Each structure stands twice: as structure tokens, then as C-alpha cells.
Amino acid sequence: MIRSWHLGDDRQSLVLASFDDRLPEAVYWGPALPTGENLETLSAAALADVTGGMVDRNAGLSLCPEASESFPGQTGLTARNASGTPLMPSFRFESEAASEHGLTLVFADKGLDLSLVFDLVLTPETSLLKLQTRLESADEITVYWLAAPVLPVPAHTGEMIEFSGRWCAEFLTRRLPFAPGSRVRDNRTGRTDHAHFPGLVICNAGTSNTAGEAFAFHYGWSGGHKMVAEELADGRRQVQFGHATASLASGRHFVSAPLYATYSATGFNGAAVRFQRHVRDHVVQGARTPRPVHYNCWEAVYFKHDLDELKAIASQAADLGAERFVLDDGWFGRRDDDTSSLGDWVIDKRKYPDGLTPLIDHIKALGMEFGIWFEPEMVNEDSDLCRAHPDWVLGHADQIRGRQQLVLDMSNQEVRDYLYAHIADVLKNNDIGYIKWDHNRILPVVDAEQAEGFYELVDRLRSDFPAVEIESCSSGGGRIDFGVLERTHRVWLSDSNDALERQRIQHDAALFLPASVTGSHVGPRHCHTSGRTLDIRLRAWTAAQRHMGFEMDPRELTEAEAETLRNVTSWWKANRSWMMQADILRLDSADPAVIAEQQLAGDGSRFVAFAALTRPSDQILPRPLRLTGLDPQGRYRLSLVNRDEAPRLSRGAPLLKHQDLEASGQYLMSHGLTLPWRFPETVWVVEGERL
Ligand code: GLA
């Protein structure tokens, strides 16, 4: 007997089938099927043959492949009972229920008193699947691995793109062949981490940003994940995501984080746009619009807080166009460097004898909002908190320190109450609209309860201070995932304010993140993390591609630099209302030295393309830049916004250098833009509107 279900829209179909009441398998995932397709026939038609050297029935590559079926690869559940005996459940259909835009399927193993529940939703506006597995046990058990609903990827997908990275180089992508065996990433850091963004894209050799098939995944969890992309000996391929294996848990109720997934027939951009829109419109809650221009004082003053200097900096930042001033690390305890005071969330009277009010009043008088830095989950041994509560520290006493700091045990209610009380006190007594929430080390012990404790604390603060926005930072981009974005409004993408590095990081992060949540700041002339010296135009346009801000000491700017920054900032302000809602489409540049993208308004009425030349090209002339996502029949007017940046060595007369261009979408997508010659480390900015 076959039961079948369909989740789909006009962009994709996912067909699930349960054979003889066994766990459901995704028997089809790909382009939208025509209405009226007979799902039962399709399910039966997908059953593979059996030959010599095999067991007599292919074990199901189900939403949770079972050891009891002798599944020949990674199973979806590994658990033991209280006496340590491995559990080998064999689940059978119990019930089904429709939910809004999805369904809930319940299966049970009556002998073991276990039930396995799949919550499956397809959000119609974004065509993103959100899939979750729950396990309920009558008895106490220990779970070593519980996968979010497991999806197969078809045999014609030969490659995968996975994510690694490091401090100052988040979202590094690697394209690997799909080969027999497993590609496993098991993150043991206890946080999302720079090196382990929980994403994966399965594709073909020919898939590009703008064309081809892609199956994309993201696991929305901040406690560290495990990913398995496996090709079985029989040729089938599966993708599994779950909590990192080190975060095993005992109890009766277990739930995976949501796995977000989508199928795109229109290249990486097709999937990227769905993730971007979903984050912007369904994950992030209550972000203020328009997005205010930031000023963050970290790279200007570090721990040296001097009220008069900060006021002077704030005045200049406001003059450049900043609308929110974020006071970074150094305002609390006796925090003169990174060796002390984390945990003592009390204003440092040596630096602020009259509290923060004089600074906040100055900032408000300039028309800016005030934001402040916390690193709640961390503690220095040199702190009143650690001296009073050494027992609140997570892990062994002789553990290796990270940035001289230890981690508080967030599963302890007393710890959460202490942090809540101190943060709430600062928020109640000061006019604060924003928190930068940092997390500057990996955990000594990987435990899901740590991330759950963090979620609970942020949720409590969010519900009591709904007007306060939060930025997720973790030495830059060490905690970026949809779990944290459900409770925050912005991510600090990277500690690298090097605009060239930023171009690459922003480009790859756009596979998942919209501009509205992606913080990007104009750093100092001499970049503090790369040692490079970069022109203000490159720095300003790079920040203007995302949620813009400044982080240099504005007193270092020459008048000409300040003027450039003022101009780019007012350009950004004039465009942010649509740009922060636009789709970021990565362009397939024919020149590998160029990183290019096009931000296209949802209704297709306008766009802006950014093309950064990151190093000298191999060929002498710029290669035409082909646009995407336009109506081939539509007519567009294009203008090179910063044509005054063309250097004297650009001696010819390409049309865009002197005047606007009117052309069809077909021409712009097929031939592309002929841009003027320019120096490396520059960005061309081209605005377009549909006529
Ligand atoms: C981390 C953050 C920085 C800054 C410092 C403060 O490194 O990523 O932006 O806030 O902490 O100590």
C-alpha cells in the first residue's frame, strides 16, 4: 500500500511516499510537477530494482533512514536506552495532519514506545521548505544523532558547494565532486562558527549563478551542526543535517533545528533569492526601516574610552551621515584591555563618572540612536562575577582559555537570571535602541543546552524590550544562522573591514543573506586586520552594497575623503528603501578578477549593479558584464553613477562613460555592459530603471 503527499508550488515539487506504512521517502524533488500528476503511480515508478549481492528490498532512503532496515549508509537516528542498549526502531504510520502550508506526519514504534514526527512546511511567498524532525520517547533515552528530515538529491547532480572559513574570511566556498562515500562536516566548536556555516548547495558542473539546477540547504541552529552528504554504494545520494554529534542529549523529547531547503532551476541565484527573502520577511522579526547608517567606534578607540573624544567622534560621524552610534567593548567593569571584566556589566565610573547619559544625550542631540556592546555568555577570571561564582563557568578548570576568557554555563537558570537582570538594568536606565551581542570564543564543551540557554535569554530580553534591535556578532561572523536571526536583526559579517576581502565575503554570504541584515562598515584607511591601504571610494561603495556603516576614526579622513563618504552615504540613503528589499543576484563575470552583483527590486522596476575589480585583469580591456533577471523584451535606462572615477588612462569613449544607455533586457543579459577601463581595487556602480 502506498500513501503519498505533495508539497509544492509553481517552482518546485516535493513528493513523499510511504510504502506499507513505513517511513516516508522523497520519491521526487525537482521542478514543479503538472497538476493532476498521479502521485501513487509516480511513487511506484520510483522503486528501484534489486540484483545480485543485494538484500531483497532496497532499504528506504526515508526522511529518517533506519538501522532496522539495514540501511547501507548514515542512518537518521542513533539512540540508546537507559541501560545503554542501542535502539533499532522500526516506525510505522500513525497519523497525518495538514498544517498551514504544510503537513505533519506521525510515525510510531509501539514496541519501543517511540514516536517520530515530521513537520514539513513550504512557505508560498518564498518557496522555501522548512523541515523539522521530532522524537518522543516514553522512557528516558540518550540520542547521539537525530537528523532533520533527510532528503535525497538526484543522481544527475554531480557536485556540491560547501562552506568553510576562518576569522576575517567567512563564507569560503568549495566546489567538490559528489563521490562514493560521505562528505562529513561535524562542528565541534559549540557555536555556528566561522569555519562551519551550516549550508550546502548540490549542483551540476554547469550550474552557474544565473543558470542550471541547484538544491540548497541551511540548518538554522546556533550550537554547531553536523552535515553528511553521502553517495551510497548503490548510487543513491542523501543529505543529512542535525546538531553536532558532540551535543548528545538524554531525555524524552528531542527536536532537530529546522532544515531550510529549496530546489532552483535558475542557478544559484534562484535559491539565494529564496533564502534572502525568507530571512528578510519570515525569519527576522521587527527590524526597523529604513535601516539606519551605523557608526561603530571599535576600530577608532578600542578600549580607550574618553568622553570628550567619543563626543567629537560622534559629531563627525553624524556629519558624515551616521544615524546610529554603537559604543563597543570597553564601557563596563574595569575593561582597559581584553584580560578583565567580562561578566561585570556595570558602567565603569572611571571612564563615565556620570554614567552613559552625557554621551547618550550628545548622541541623541545629533539625531542618532545609541547602541551598546555586550558579550553576555562570557566571563573573565579577573571579574567580580567569576570571583563570586566560579561554579558558573562551563567546562574544566584547566581548560584552554580563549581571548583570556571563559564561558558561562547558559543551561543554569541562575546564570541567565543574572545576565538578564544586568542587561535589563542597563537598558532600563539608559536610552538604548540597539545591542551588539558578541561571542568571542568557541565553547569548551559542546552542548545544545548552551545554545538553548542563549536563545532563552535573548527571547526574554526581546519580549521585555521589543524596541531594542540586536546584532549577532562572534568575532565577526562566527554566529550567523537562521536560528540566531529569528531573534536578532543584523549580523556582523566579518571583523575584516578590508573592502577587497569584504567583496568576496559579501558575495558568498549573499547565497543566504539579504542586504538588510548584513552589516558592512567603511573601515580605516590602513586596514587593521589585513594591513592593506585602500581608497575611500572602494571602501565606501563596498559598504554601500549592504547595511551601511562606518568604523574608522572619522578624524583620520581628509576633507576629500569625507566628501566622498558623505556623497556615497547620501546615495545609499536615497536608495535604501528599495535596495534593502531587493534581491541580490550574483553575476557570472567573464573576468575572474571581477566580483559583480546586481540588486534588483522585487517588481523589476529598477536595479543597481556593482562590479568590483579586485586585481588587475589578465586581458587589457574590461570584459562586458552580463546582467540578469531582466525582462528580455523590456527597455531599460542605465547610468554609470560614479563615472567621475574613470582614470585618465581610460582614453577611449565607451558610451556609459559619457552618457546614459537605453537598451533592451535581452541585450543587457546577452551582450552585457561595456564599462570603461579602470584601476584595480575600484567598484563601478551602474543604476538601471525600466522604462
Ligand atoms: C569582537 C568583535 C569586534 C569587537 C570586539 C570587541 O572581536 O567581532 O567587532 O566588538 O570583539 O572586543
Image (cartoon, rainbow, N blue to C red):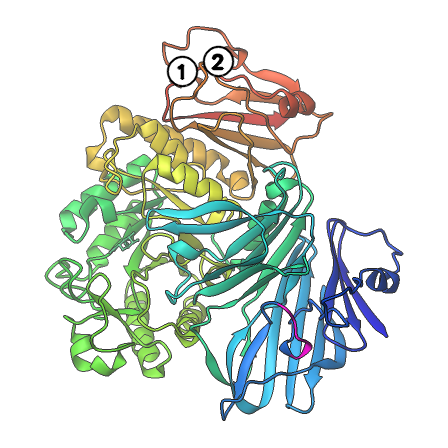
Foreground residue, 29 or 223? Answer: 29
Q: Quadrant of residue 468?
A: bottom left
Mark 1 secondary-structure assignment: loop
Q: Is residue 339 above or below residue 640?
A: below
Q: Is residue 483 magenta?
A: no
* x and y, in percent, of residue 126 in the image: 65, 52
**Residue at coordinates 10% horizontally, 61% vertically from top-left?**
350
Q: What's the CA distance linking mark 1 and mark 2?
A: 8 Å
Check disc 2 and report the residue beneath it.
657
Question: Is 48 left, or right, of 290 in this rendering?
Answer: right
The quadrant the C terminus occupies is: top right
Disc 2 Cβ-to-ligand 1 distance below 8 Å: no
Q: Is residue 677 above or below residue 133?
A: above
Q: Answer yes or no: do the residues labelled 1 and 2 have beta carbons within 8 Å? A: yes
Question: Is 139 left, or right, of 298 in this rendering?
Answer: right
Foreground residue, 135 or 227? Answer: 227
**Residue at coordinates 80% horizontally, 62% vertically from top-left?**
49
**Which residue type carries mark 2?**
Lys
Residue sitting at the far front: 52
Foreground residue, 690 or 121? Answer: 121
**Which residue type carries mark 1?**
Ala
Q: Is residue 512 visible?
A: no
Which residues, given as a range, are shown in magenta?
68-72
* x and y, in percent, of residue 375 in the image: 29, 64
* x and y, in percent, of residue 369 in the image: 34, 51
Disc 1 Cβ-to-ligand 1 distance below 8 Å: no
Residue sitting at the far top: 652
Mark 2 secondary-structure assignment: helix
Check disc 1 and report the residue beneath it.
646
Foreground residue, 557 or 259? Answer: 259
